[in-house]
Image: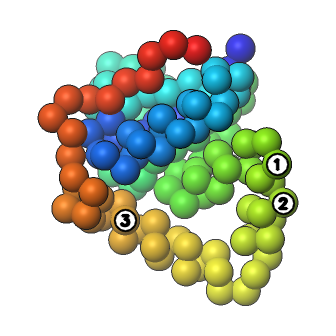
Amino acid sequence: MPQYLIIYDGQCNLCSTGVQAVHALDQGRLFTYLPMQDETALAAWGITPDTCAQGMMVINMDEPDQRWQGSAAVEQLVSLLPGLAPWVDTYRGLDGLKAWGDACYAQIRDHRYEWFGARADIYRVTGP
């Protein structure tokens, strides 16, 4: 049973492609997925669309108070994928790299539709 919930922008081409890649690697073992456009499901987690405007989220479903958002969510997600945790540890440990990554994430988040386009429909993960 998946332990982590990934909340992503189901209209963003980049976000949807990223979720497709994670789903292909994970095959339903660790992650389940929720587009931020599903306001009813978000409300069940105590999340508003305004909260989602700050970036993607990863929630530990066993301990729902344990949440990551924005670049921290990307780091957490990547660190949970097989074999990638050492790379995230290295990234976090290099002076200035984390701050640069945070700034890059913010730019991508704020310009994702103009740079990568928007889907006409909401992308939803199907299957395990």
Q: Position of residue 99 (x, y in %)?
A: 58, 79
Image height of 85 relative to 37, above or below: below
The reply to whether the C-beta atoms of the residues labelled 1 and 2 are less than 8 Å apart is yes
Q: Residues within 10 Å of mark 2 (few under 14, many from 20)?
A: few
Q: Position of residue 81 (x, y in %)?
A: 73, 42
- Cα distance, mark 1 to mark 3? 26 Å
Helix, strand or loop under label 2: helix
In terms of depth relative to the viewer, which is nearer, 50 or 18?
18
The residue singled out by tag 3 in the image is: 108
Disc number for residue 83: 1
- Cα distance, mark 1 to mark 2? 7 Å
- Cα distance, mark 2 to mark 3? 24 Å
Q: Residues within 10 Å of mark 3 (few under 14, many from 20)?
A: some
The reply to whether the C-beta atoms of the residues labelled 2 and 3 are less than 8 Å apart is no
Measuring 53% from the left and 71% from the top, which residue is drawn there?
102
Helix, strand or loop under label 3: helix
The residue singled out by tag 2 in the image is: 86
Helix, strand or loop under label 1: loop
Image height of 98 relative to 52, above or below: below
Measuring 21% from the left and 46% from the top, which residue is drawn there?
118
Measuring 50% from the left and 27% from the top, which residue is drawn there?
33
